[in-house]
Amino acid sequence: MLSCKRNLRFLIIGATISTVGDWLNTLALMSMMVEISNSGVELSALMMLRALPKIVLGPIFAGFIDRFDKKKILIISCIINSVVIIFIPVFDNIICIYIITVILSTIDIFTYPTIRSLIPLLVEKEDLVKVNATYSSVTSVIDISAPLLSGIILSIFTLNTCFFIDSASFIAFLILVLLIRYDGNSQETYENEQESVLINSKNFFKIIRKNNVLFKVIQGSFLGNLSLGIIYVTEILFFERILHVQSNHYGFFVAIVGIGLLLGALMIQKIKGHLYDVFALGVILFGLGITLFSFTTELYLTVLLLIIEGIGEALFTIATVSLIQLNSNKDNCAGLLTINESLSKAAYLISISISGFLIDFINVQYTMLIAGIISLAYGFIYVFNCIHGINATDEATLSKGGR
């Protein structure tokens, strides 16, 4: 038990340090792009390139993580990230920055699923939801504080120094990963298999089609992220045009969503019942918050609805990860998490690309309303699923964790 807590502490602290570094890297890269080109198009291209590798390469590499020792994957990822980031200040042209961005984003394909798939190897099945909620609580606190902290660092230090600090954050993560102790021998046999990673990855889609719970969860996660992409582009314009809030104050309202995320992470540990019900509640609550938000003209109501939005997002995000973990085993958990991440990023990218078009041809309020309706639509899917019921196989899968 003590070893379990020790391992989790190292993993969560390391992931937290890495997340702060990622925020700093994102803001520093955006600042560098503005200094070099001051072009909105090229800045948008940078953000697109950060998402594309997860969409294109995620499904291809989905089987890789489950075939090798997860600790070794994190170690290699930390080393590559740390080295590549150091080279960013050396290059001052856009093409090189784009290439480095793609490399970093490609390495990131392995990091998140590896962390999440490592957790079930460190804790008992019955503790998964609690541990995932704890991890998400920490992430929510970081989402509130990291942008502010990164802004302070950027204002104090030069861009080059910021990149060195980011590189150092991965070294710190590397040291903490090295301190983790767990039995990774069960994965060694996969290193000698002749089956290709690509073929192995195709099997994950078969697993999802055959497992009704996984299919329903990934379906809802896709819709939720389809809404998130629209919100990402539309919300700041909504504050400026409808609520008449200056864009430099937008960070305050992002922090309010983070408070909702933290509350949702705490709430899910107290909610009794089927995880799929919690998941569906989260998607619907998220959609309801966004839908009502689109009609809001009062700031005090906006604060309340942003908290509701954050709570809903936390519920469906934590439930998604927990349900995938419970409906998988050590041989396919990371792969299924990677597939879900890739599909979510695809939805996110699609919605980002169409949101600008929607804002120009209708208006900000109706675009925001569309985002809410997309998530609320899952309510009909949920009712349909409840009418048909979760069959005995699904119940057994949930109760046994798919193992």
Image (spheres, grey):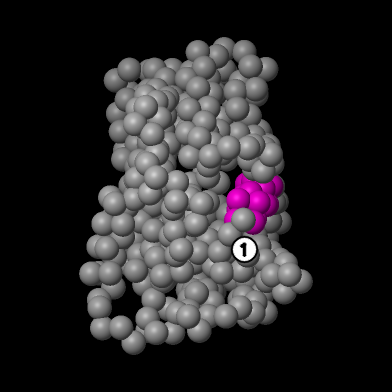
Image height check: is 353 above or below 126? above
State the image coordinates of residue 161 (x, y, percent, origin top left).
Answer: 63, 67
Is residue 95 shown left or right of residue 170? left
User: In this figure, which residue is indicated by the disc labeled 1?
Assistant: 124
The quarter of the rendered structure image containing the N terminus is: bottom right
Image height check: is 323 above or below 83? above
Say which of 199 and 305 sits in front.
199
Q: Main secondary structure of the magenta part?
A: helix
Residue 266, visible in the rendered structure: yes
Task: Pick out the residue farthest to the front.
Answer: 392
Residue 161, visible in the rendered structure: no
Residue bounds of the magenta highlight? 127-143
Say which of 49 and 284 sits in front.
284
Is residue 278 shown left or right of residue 4? left
State the image coordinates of residue 111 (x, y, percent, origin top left).
Answer: 49, 65
Q: Residue at x 44, y 53 (%)?
A: 397
Image height check: is 217 above or below 96? above
Q: Residue at x 53, y 61 (%)?
A: 116
Mark 1: which secondary structure?
Answer: loop
Q: Residue at x 57, y 18 (%)?
A: 244
Say which of 56 and 222 sits in front.
222
- Give the residue type at disc 1: Glu
Q: Residue at x 48, y 28 (%)?
A: 284
